[in-house]
Image (spheres, rainbow, N blue to C red):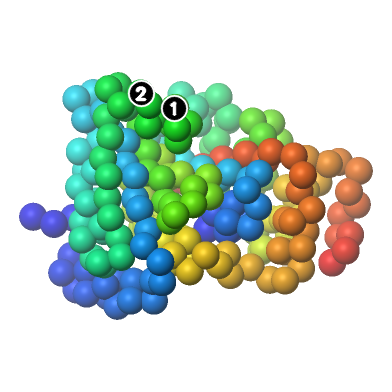
Amino acid sequence: MRLAYSFAIENDLIRADGIEASEFPDLSSRYRVYAVPRTVVNQGAYIEGSLPENVFLDSILKAVNPETREGEAL
Amino acid sequence: MGLIRDDDALEIRERLKDMVSPVRLIHFTQELNLEYGREARHLIEEVGGLSDKLSVEVYNFLLDKERVAEYGIDKVPATVIRNGKDYGIRFYGIPAGYEFSAVLDTILAVSQGDSGLRPESREKLAGIAEPLHLEVFVTPT
């Protein structure tokens, strides 16, 4: 969650919500949140777990642009 | 009566001394129908009292439609963390445990206007040219 907020600080096009899953059971069930943290990207792709900064960011970039090769520009 | 213990409050005050610009915590509630609403509001108000650079505004999700629309709030309790600028940072629910600490970190980062990220991350993020919405589901630990 902390990383997602940091990403939002860097780029105005990014918005980041931290959501306490148990307080929003309907939304959590819609996104099939069984384990946390689970990050939903643009209401679509999922990223599981708490990841290091570069891995988390690359996973997001890959989710929004599947043509980006994993590890590119690292 | 506080939700934050006295010794924790002292520690948080110390942490918040690193704040630079004022930060606004904009809280949306709908206390009547919410199991957690009252507690969330009290927690945010207590945090707001721990630094002169923090201010808290509370709006009603059902009545303050203009603010709800301005901040794109679609569920409550919701808290916006912003300075002079709205970065698009929201927390929905009660931030507890590790998430509470992450919220404090974020208050500091927003106040300093610095994400604290590595240069290579900043570079990649600058290249994002389409709207990106991240929803991070968490639970108190």
Residue type for callout 2 = Lys
**Label 1 crowd bin: few (<14), some (14–19), many (20+), radius 10 Å:** few
Residue drawn at x 76%, y 68% is: B120
Res. B104 in view: no
The disc at residue B69 is 1
Looking at the rendered structure, the number of numbered marks drawn on it comes to 2
Provide the chain ID for the residue under circle 2.
B
Residue drawn at x 36%, y 62% is: B22
In front here: B141 or B2? B2
Compared across the picture, whether B7 is left or right of A35 comes to left
Provide the chain ID for the residue under circle 1.
B
In front here: B5 or B56? B56
Res. B16 in view: yes
- The quadrant in which the N terminus of chain B is found is bottom left
In front here: B27 or B96? B27
In the rendered structure, are the residues bearing label 1 and label 2 in contact, judged by CB atoms less than 8 Å apart?
yes
The disc at residue B65 is 2
The disc at residue A1 is none
Which percent across, then down, holds residue B43?
A: 24, 51
Residue type for callout 1 = Ala
